[in-house]
Image: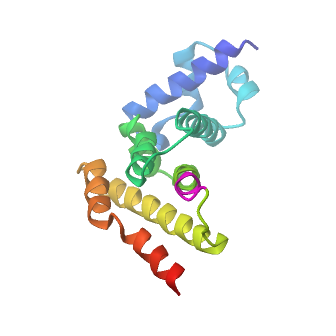
Amino acid sequence: MPNSTKKAIKETFLALLDERPLNRITVKDIVETCKINRNSFYYHFEDLPALLEEIIAERVQELIQSHPTVDSLEDCFDAAVEFVRENRRAVLHVYSSLSRDVFERYLMEVCLYVVTTYVEADFAGRPVDRQDKEMIIRYHKCECFGNIIDWLNSGMEYDISAYFHRIYQLKRGWEGEVLRRDSRS
């Protein structure tokens, strides 16, 4: 089967997902729109959840590759939010579906990646206890994930990037102060 068929299936699925909730999309809708038979769909994908998971996994990898470095915690959150904003309606449809766990798993992966990338670069060459660094990463990963989930629950009604930038403007220097106190002990 040509790779163009697989690409067409994905594009059609995303277009349908932008129009309607996930639970109102069927394999029949996809194959009729693509003008292929059901066997062609099942040649490439086991079912709709497998199609969804592959698309999300690809988007996560694209996002990670496009952000090899992260210069600030604000950039961390902007990168994670970018993952969600690209297809706002589709994301809200997936988030409201039974496949929400797939989205959340990949969102957590994005949050972990961007925070780890920043923390590793920020603490490079500095004597920071491994456990302390892991705690900082876990804290910010969960902070990022939790705030994005809260934003999704609000229907993405506010500017979450501005929110993160303001929070980190308020928190600037806080982590550095903790590390200075620890080094004096």
Closer to us: 149 or 180: 180
Report x, y in % for residue 178.
Answer: 44, 77
Query: Residue visible at 46% across and 75% down?
Result: 180
Q: Is residue 20 left or right of residue 122?
A: left
In the rendered picture of this protein, how many numbered marks are placed on residues? 0
Q: Is residue 89 left or right of residue 15?
A: left
Q: Is residue 143 left or right of residue 39?
A: left
Looking at this view, name the residue that lies furthest to the front.
184
Report x, y in % for residue 72.
Answer: 42, 50
Q: Would residue 122 be counted in the magenta stretch?
A: yes
User: Magenta stretch: dominant SS?
Assistant: helix
Image vertical order of residue 184 relative to residue 60, above or below? below
Closer to us: 62 or 87: 62
Q: Quadrant of residue 148?
A: bottom left
Image vertical order of residue 163 relative to residue 19, above or below? below
Q: Quadrant of residue 166?
A: bottom left
Query: Residue visible at 51% across and 23% down?
Result: 12
Closer to us: 87 or 110: 110
Looking at this view, name the residue that lies furthest to the bottom.
185
Q: What stretch of residues is rendered in magenta?
A: 119-124
Image vertical order of residue 60 relative to residue 2, above or below? below
Q: Quadrant of the N terminus?
A: top right
Query: Residue visible at 48% across and 41% down?
Result: 22
Report x, y in % for residue 85.
Answer: 38, 39
What colour scheme was applied to this rendering of the protein?
rainbow
Residue 176 seen in the current view = yes
